[in-house]
């Protein structure tokens, strides 16, 4: 993408920015389809004005991106900002699942309306790497803090710091049962998932003995009576052992905390971890089967920077493989849901949270609410996992709901006739304009023919915004445009 004289610093900023070759409208649309939760006219205008390099520079430094409206929206959540100890001390009865549900609702709101779109995409990827099901009953008091202080705090920073924070957080300790793990009775759940899901992966070839030793080393990480995350030396197994090549000598239990930290940081930068997380990022941004050469380059960046996320993302976006991958990904149900609201210009509710609550229940019912995957391996991000007639029908129903502004009524939906200005003068031009406005690109010939057939009009026939058919039925034409294959492209 840039010429060979571009360099990247350890923190991820270009020391010298070379001119980008990928500045066509198609390139900009491809970038926004992958690096956001769905293109909007405003986002397309912004990247056209800034250029792809400058747009990426801003997105990779979220502090530079103004996001006051969404930050203010977060303030409407009564439980999201509370600490685990605070909710633990108050007890379940006054809290219930509210903190978890607010976390899901706020995440959905950020995906729809945040200006820090690339950050929100990467947060989603990393939530699936260090997954804690939300909502799930055992983390009713801690999942909101895990979102704030683990995933979001470190998403554009050090994966090692994120892994350590995750291992020591009440949500992960509870979710994967390390709170019950002691020297006398080690629980293997977290020790196994740390290797299998969070770091090196089963393909790295660790043994069952490695899993057992991993669990023994992690004993002592638990939760105190006041709800705080602590290391309890009295529960730690200080025996000598080796975990997948990480050697721990016999040690006093009080020294166990330091050895746990060293083990987690060693895993975070292991070459197998570098390749595995790079593969997940490339799967999100490039293709369901990303090129091995790209993953290798990303993994080398991971290793050379000590697991810094932003430089790895720069390696990805600077690659020819990324820019050649247009059309190789399709949207997941959640992504389709969010992208529909974004392209229709749906505005957040002016007060309260009733609208986002209804949106969240809808996407939860569809089986793809943010962070709600029931198993600890996180949501899949390949097309074959989501192909089904019922899933397609559900998407189409939501397209119709949102195109017509039927649901939820608390949100601000644009009238279909307001999506196009000036309004086209022929039916062919109308269909063409809807395609570009809603999907960012022209529709295929088959899609255009199908829409004209539905309307019962010829391409050259005149049309007007005052036409009775337009006034009564344009919403259906909008929904059908969103039902077509062009809109499914990530």
Image: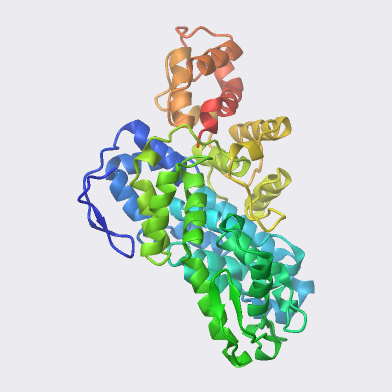
Q: Residue 150, image x and y in percent?
A: 54, 69
State the count of labels: 0
The quadrant of the picture occupied by the N terminus is top left
- Which is more toward the observer, 380 or 410? 380
- Which is more toward the observer, 268 or 152? 268
Using the image, determine if residue 32 lies above or below residue 449. below
Q: Is residue 35 left or right of residue 51?
A: right
Determine which quarter of the picture holds residue 473.
top right
Using the image, determine if residue 200 lies above or below residue 327. below
Whether residue 42 is visible, yes or no, is no
Q: How is the image coloured?
A: rainbow
Using the image, determine if residue 307 lies above or below residue 484. below
Whether residue 357 is visible, yes or no, is yes
Which residue is painted at 26% across and 45% down in the image? 2
Which residue is painted at 74% across and 74% down in the image? 187
- Which is more toward the observer, 368 or 77? 368
Q: Residue 167, image x and y in percent?
A: 60, 73
Check the image and name the residue furthest to the right: 93
Q: Residue 379, image x and y in percent?
A: 63, 50
- Which is more toward the observer, 338 or 372? 372
Using the image, determine if residue 152 lies above or below residue 252. above
Determine which quarter of the picture holds residue 470.
top right
Q: Residue 164, image x and y in percent?
A: 54, 73
Which residue is painted at 69% across and 91% down in the image? 234
């Amino acid at each position: 993408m840039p010429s060979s004289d571009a360099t990247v610093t350890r923190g991820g900023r270009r020391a010298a920015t070379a001119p980008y070759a990928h500045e066509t409208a198609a390139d900009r649309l491809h970038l926004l389809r992958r690096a956001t939760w769905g293109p909007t006219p405003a986002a397309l205008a912004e990247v056209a004005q800034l250029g792809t390099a400058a747009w990426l520079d801003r997105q990779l430094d979220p502090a530079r991106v103004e996001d006051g409206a969404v930050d203010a929206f977060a303030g409407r959540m009564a439980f999201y900002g509370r600490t685990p100890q605070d909710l633990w001390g108050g007890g379940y009865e006054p809290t219930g699942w509210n903190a978890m549900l607010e976390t899901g609702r706020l995440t959905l709101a950020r995906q729809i309306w945040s200006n820090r779109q690339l950050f929100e995409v990467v947060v989603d990827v990393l939530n699936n790497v260090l997954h804690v099901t939300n909502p799930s009953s055992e983390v009713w008091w801690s999942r909101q803090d895990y979102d704030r202080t683990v995933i979001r705090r470190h998403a554009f920073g050090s994966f090692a710091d994120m892994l350590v924070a995750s291992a020591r957080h009440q949500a992960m300790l509870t979710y994967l049962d390390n709170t019950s793990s002691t020297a006398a009775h080690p629980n293997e759940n977290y020790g196994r998932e740390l290797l299998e899901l969070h770091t090196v992966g089963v393909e790295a070839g660790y043994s069952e003995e490695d899993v057992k030793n991993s669990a023994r080393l992690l004993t002592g990480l638990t939760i105190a009576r006041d709800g705080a995350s602590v290391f309890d030396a009295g529960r730690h197994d200080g025996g000598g052992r080796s975990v997948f090549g990480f050697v721990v000598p016999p040690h006093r239990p009080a020294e166990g905390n330091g050895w746990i930290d060293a083990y987690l940081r060693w895993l975070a930068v292991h070459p197998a971890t570098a390749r595995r997380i790079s593969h997940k990022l490339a799967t999100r941004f490039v293709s369901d089967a990303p090129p091995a050469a790209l993953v290798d380059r990303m993994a080398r960046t991971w290793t050379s920077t000590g697991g810094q996320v932003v430089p790895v993302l720069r390696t990805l976006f600077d690659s020819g493989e990324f820019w050649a991958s247009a059309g190789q990904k399709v949207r997941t149900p959640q992504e389709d849901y969010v992208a529909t609201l974004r392209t229709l210009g749906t505005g957040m509710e002016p007060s309260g949270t009733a609208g986002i609550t209804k949106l969240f229940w809808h996407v939860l019912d569809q089986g793809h609410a943010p962070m709600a995957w029931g198993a600890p391996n996180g949501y899949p991000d390949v097309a074959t996992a989501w192909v089904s007639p019922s899933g397609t029908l559900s998407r189409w129903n939501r397209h119709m709901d949102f195109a017509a502004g039927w649901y939820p009524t608390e949100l601000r939906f644009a009238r279909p006739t307001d999506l196009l200005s000036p309004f086209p003068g022929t039916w062919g031009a109308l269909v063409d304009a809807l395609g570009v406005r809603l999907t960012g690109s022209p529709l295929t010939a088959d899609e255009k023919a199908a829409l004209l057939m539905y309307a019962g009009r010829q391409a050259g026939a005149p049309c007007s915004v005052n036409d009775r058919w337009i006034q009564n039925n344009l919403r259906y034409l909008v929904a059908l445009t969103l039902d077509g294959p062009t809109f499914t492209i990530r």
